[in-house]
Amino acid sequence: MMSNPQEEKEILDEEIVDGEPEPVRFEDKRRFDDSGERVEVKVDVEEDSPNPKAPNPSNDEPKKSAEVVLLEQQLTEITKRCVAAESKLQEVQKRFEQERENLEKETSEMRTRMRKSLEQQADSSRFTFLESLLPVLDNLILALHAAETDASLDNLLGGVQGTARSFEQALISVGVKPIAAVGEKFDPQLHEAVDMLETDEENVGLVTAEYARGYTFNDRLLRPARVQVGTGAAKQNAGE
């Protein structure tokens, strides 16, 4: 037996809330025709549309302040400048390395040229000196030949003296100069006193004899002259 639709339209029931019964209303959504049969009602279900009131996740993010945006722009600009500066520094360093290599190469070549030039100058100086000694050797050979053919000591002495003069001239030609000694005031920078001679007051402190001639080379002391120096002991002894 089917129930009356009008009777099923509303149903009351009781629900206990906070310990007291409270009526609860239910609304019957079903549909029936005049004969009491249930009618199926098609309901078009639309797709869920976004609720305009629903929170948008993208809107939940806090907006950046103008100061933060400015700082980010400045940071980006500084980063670009740092990258550009680093690139320029690498370029400068590369150029510096190239210049250093070129300078080292030029310095090495210059040293080689200077060494060769000095060696050539030294060879030229030695050549000139040896060339100047050849006449000395010639004079010595002539003196020996003269002594063999002539027993006179005068001829031998003259030949030896000529040889000595030639040799001294050869030394002078390369910058060697003899140091004046006899009659000069004793100079410890140029003379080496190896003997003392008691003499009068006028000759005190003067070189009275020369045992070995001294020489200088380009104003440098090559060898001091070995000399005898006069002292005033003779006058003191006479006074006693």
Image (cartoon, rainbow, N blue to C red):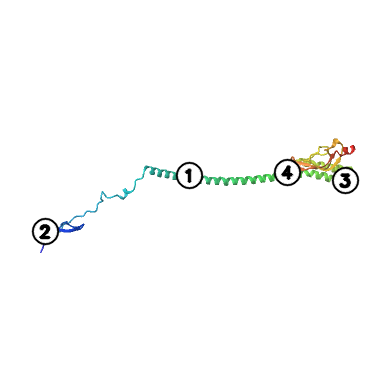
Mark 3 is surrounded, within 10 Å at the Cα level, by few (under 14), some (14 to 19) or many (20 or more) other residues, namely some
For disc 3, the marked residue is 147
Q: Nearer the viewer, residue 187 or 18?
A: 18
Q: Is residue 76 left or right of residue 103?
A: left
For disc 4, the marked residue is 125
Where is residue 201? Give x, y as percent: 86, 36
The disc labelled 3 sits on which kind of residue?
Ala
Q: What's the mark number on residue 7?
A: 2
Mark 2 or mark 4: name the one nearer the start of the chain.
2
| Residue contact at pointers 1 and 2, CB within 8 angstroms | no
Q: What is the C-alpha distance between the residues marked 3 and 4?
A: 34 Å
Mark 1 or mark 4: name the one nearer the start of the chain.
1
Q: Is residue 154 left or right of residue 24?
A: right
Residue occupying image coordinates x 40% and y 43%: 71
Q: Is mark 3 on a helix, strand or loop?
A: helix
Kindly report which numbered mark, 3 or 4, lies closer to the viewer in this rendering.
4
Q: Is mark 2 on a helix, strand or loop?
A: helix
Q: Is mark 4 on a helix, strand or loop?
A: helix
Where is residue 22? Give x, y as percent: 17, 56
Kindly report which numbered mark, 1 or 2, lies closer to the viewer in this rendering.
2
Kindly report which numbered mark, 3 or 1, lies closer to the viewer in this rendering.
1
Where on the picture, by quarter, is residue 81?
top left
Where is residue 162? Give x, y as percent: 83, 41
Where on the picture, by quarter, is residue 41?
bottom left
For disc 1, the marked residue is 85
Mark 1 is surrounded, within 10 Å at the Cα level, by few (under 14), some (14 to 19) or many (20 or more) other residues, namely few
The disc labelled 4 sits on which kind of residue?
Ser
The N terminus: image quadrant? bottom left
